[in-house]
Image (tube, rainbow, N blue to C red):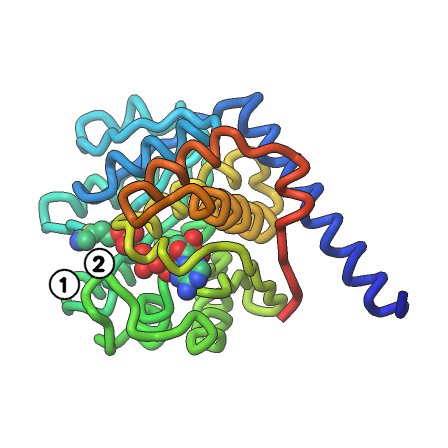
Amino acid sequence: MEPSNLNKEQDQNSWALNAWTLLSKLRDQSPLIQCITNFVSMDLMANTLLSAGASPAMIHSIEEIQDFTPLIHALCINVGTLSPAWLPAMREAALVANKAGKPWILDPVAAGASCFRLKACLELVGLKPSVIRGNGSEIIALSKASLGATKGVDSSHESMDAMEAAKSLAQSSGAIVAVSGAVDIITDGHRVVGAHNGVSMLQKVTATGCAVTALIAAFVAVDPLHALEATASALSIFGIAGEMGMDMAKGPASLRMHLIDSLYNLDQASVSSRLKVSSL
Ligand SMILES: Nc1ncnc2c1ncn2[C@@H]1O[C@H](COP(=O)(O)OP(=O)(O)O)[C@@H](O)[C@H]1O
Ligand SMILES: Cc1ncsc1CCOP(=O)(O)O
Ligand SMILES: [Mg+2]
């Protein structure tokens, strides 16, 4: 084997081992993940977290945050069905999580769809999330702080179109930025890696983006000091579960079911043989 191919194979093996180690830790530790999320995603997000081994809590009332948020292991904030009444709780939860030293992850759903949503997302970015995960259009809108070509919650860009936007957002915010798509891009503003697992049918199941963001929160909860690696691992594991689910599915509805089952049953052999991460 060529030395460069040998290096790539060793890299691949070490990403796969790290992803498996984090999934095993997650299953052992069952981190408590607080989710302040949209009405569409609540069920799939909670089931994704449970099947991965985490403990989800969809607790979003501002009255509960001072008591509850210091006890969590990570927080996921998702603005999918945002209205003004939800914003104070999102702010408060981010501040309490920061004070308690707990990582929090932002999903800026449809960030470029309206001024209200964009302003809210930019304010949340200013509250220092550990990771921001969006689709191509969302990351471009946030990075340029402008309303952009987006089809509501769906992307009108390929993830690769958002590479420079992701790097620039990571540098300006200090967060790890992940852009989902055919290739998931993960960057700290300098280093960029691509996670290649997944199937395009995932786009036909609502809230898979939201669910993978919550899974990132669970992975970061068990390895907060290596948020880039944890994020790439979560995206890879979700993508592999999607591929294995697709082998059994007949369409979007059965993919949703088989995705959850595959995540629950995922073993080391499947992670080792399927995981594909590369430097971009
Ligand atoms: N073309 C594609 N091929 C393979 N996987 C994809 C593709 N598009 C999206 N995915 C996967 O689907 C999941 C949801 O991503 P995406 O649809 O981009 O998010 P959102 O629902 O927030 O727009 C991610 O795990 C992503 O990797
Ligand atoms: C359809 C829809 N409308 C508001 S939030 C939402 C769910 C979006 O989920 P995802 O970003 O994972 O596709
Ligand atoms: Mg989304």
Which mark is on residue 120? 2
Q: Where does residue 65 sit, x and y in percent of width and height?
A: 26, 29
| Element at label 1 | helix
> Mark 1 sits on what residue?
116
Instruction: Give me the residue at 78% from left, 57% from top.
Output: 9
Residue contact between numbered discs 1 and 2, judged by CB atoms under 8 Å: yes
Please tell me in which quadrant of the rendered image residue 5 appears.
bottom right
Mark 2 residue type: Ala
Q: In the rendered view, would you say 74 is above or below 212?
A: above
Left or right placement of residue 171 versus residue 92 in this view: right
Q: Is residue 33 above or below residue 82?
A: above
Identified by mark 1, the residue type is Phe
Local crowd size for mark 2, using a 10 Å CA cut-off: few (<14), some (14–19), many (≥20): many
Q: How many numbered dots are placed on residues in this image?
A: 2
Residue at image position (33%, 53%) is 107
C-alpha distance separating marks 1 and 2: 6 Å
Q: Kindly identify which numbered label has been placed on residue 224.
A: none
Query: On screen, 65 above or below 193?
Result: above
- Residue at mark 2: C-beta within 8 A of ligand 2: no
Measuring from the top left, give residue 2's x and y in whole percent: 89, 70
Do we see residue 51 in this rendering? yes
Name the foreground residue: 246 vs 227: 246
- The picture places residue 260, in percent across and down from the top left corner, at 40, 35
Quadrant occupied by the N terminus: bottom right
Please state the horizontal and vertical placement of residue 17, each as a whole percent of the image.
71, 42
Q: Is 218 on the left or on the right of 42, as rendered? A: right
Q: Quadrant of residue 109?
A: bottom left
Q: Secondary structure at mark 2?
A: helix
Instruction: Look at 63% across and 66% down and name the residue there.
Output: 191
Picture quarter with the C terminus: bottom right
